[in-house]
């Protein structure tokens, strides 16, 4: 069994299976996951891709804090988070989260906590590329209060 918390800020494509393997164990009756992907439209504008930029040392530290807070809040959970930086195209995964727990409720609650909290606190910024050739920085917290979706 792995450590209770694993985090990674990477330029490489994300591997949800590897994150699940990091949190899996014989005590895990539930493994919940979330994958955020680059979508093709934002606020009515056609999107071709996104640049994710980060102050990587601080982003790594804050991502670890978020994971450790989830572990403290839901005793017994294991959390793995990976956030990609660099230029991504529509369909690419930008963030992946896996949480294992003996029961489903803590796993699901921890996944939601992790995605909502990292969007607010982790210094990763995104600049969308639009079909018309323009680019614009996007508030990463804009979707943090949506009731469904990422």
Image (tube, grey):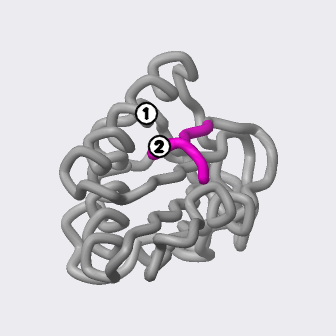
Mark 1 / mark 2, whichever is N-terminal: 2
- In the image: residue 59, left or right of residue 35: left
Residue 48 location (% of width, % of height): 70, 65
| Residue 146 found in image quarter | bottom left
Number of numbered markers: 2
Residue 142 location (% of width, % of height): 28, 58
Within 10 Å of the Cα at label 2, are there few (<14), some (14-19), or many (20+) other Cα atoms? many
Labels 1 & 2 near each other (Cβ < 8 A): yes
Which residue shows up at 71% across the image and 73% down it?
91
Residue farthest toward the front in the current orientation of the protein: 26
Mark 1, secondary structure of its residue: helix
Q: Nearer the viewer, residue 116 or 43?
A: 116
Circle 1 or circle 2, nearest the eye = 2
Residue 18 location (% of width, % of height): 73, 60
Give yes or no for residue 100 being in the magenta stretch.
no
Residue 16 location (% of width, % of height): 68, 66
| Residue 130 found in image quarter | bottom right
Q: What range is drawn magenta here? A: 1-8
Give yes or no for residue 5 being in the magenta stretch.
yes
* Numbered tag placed on residue 112 in the rendering: none
86 up-or-down from 19: above or below:
above
Residue position marked by numbered label 1 in the rendering: 64
Q: Is residue 132 visible?
A: no
Within 10 Å of the Cα at label 1, are there few (<14), some (14-19), or many (20+) other Cα atoms? many
Q: CA distance from mark 1 to mark 2?
A: 7 Å
* Numbered tag placed on residue 5 in the rendering: 2
Which residue shows up at 45% across the image and 19% down it?
58
């Amino acid at each position: 069994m792995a450590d209770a918390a694993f985090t990674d800020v990477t330029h490489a494509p994300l591997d949800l299976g590897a994150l699940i393997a990091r949190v899996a164990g014989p005590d895990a009756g539930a493994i919940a996951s979330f994958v955020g992907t680059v979508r093709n439209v934002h606020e009515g504008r056609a999107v071709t891709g996104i640049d994710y930029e980060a102050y990587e040392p601080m982003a790594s530290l804050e991502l670890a804090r978020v994971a450790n807070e989830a572990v403290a809040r839901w005793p017994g959970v294991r959390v793995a988070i990976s956030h990609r930086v660099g230029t991504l195209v529509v369909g690419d995964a930008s963030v992946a989260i896996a949480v294992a727990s003996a029961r489903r409720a803590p796993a699901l609650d921890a996944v939601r906590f992790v995605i909502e909290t990292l969007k607010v606190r982790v210094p990763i910024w995104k600049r969308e590329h639009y079909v018309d050739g323009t680019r614009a920085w996007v508030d990463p917290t804009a979707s943090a209060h949506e009731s469904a979706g990422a």
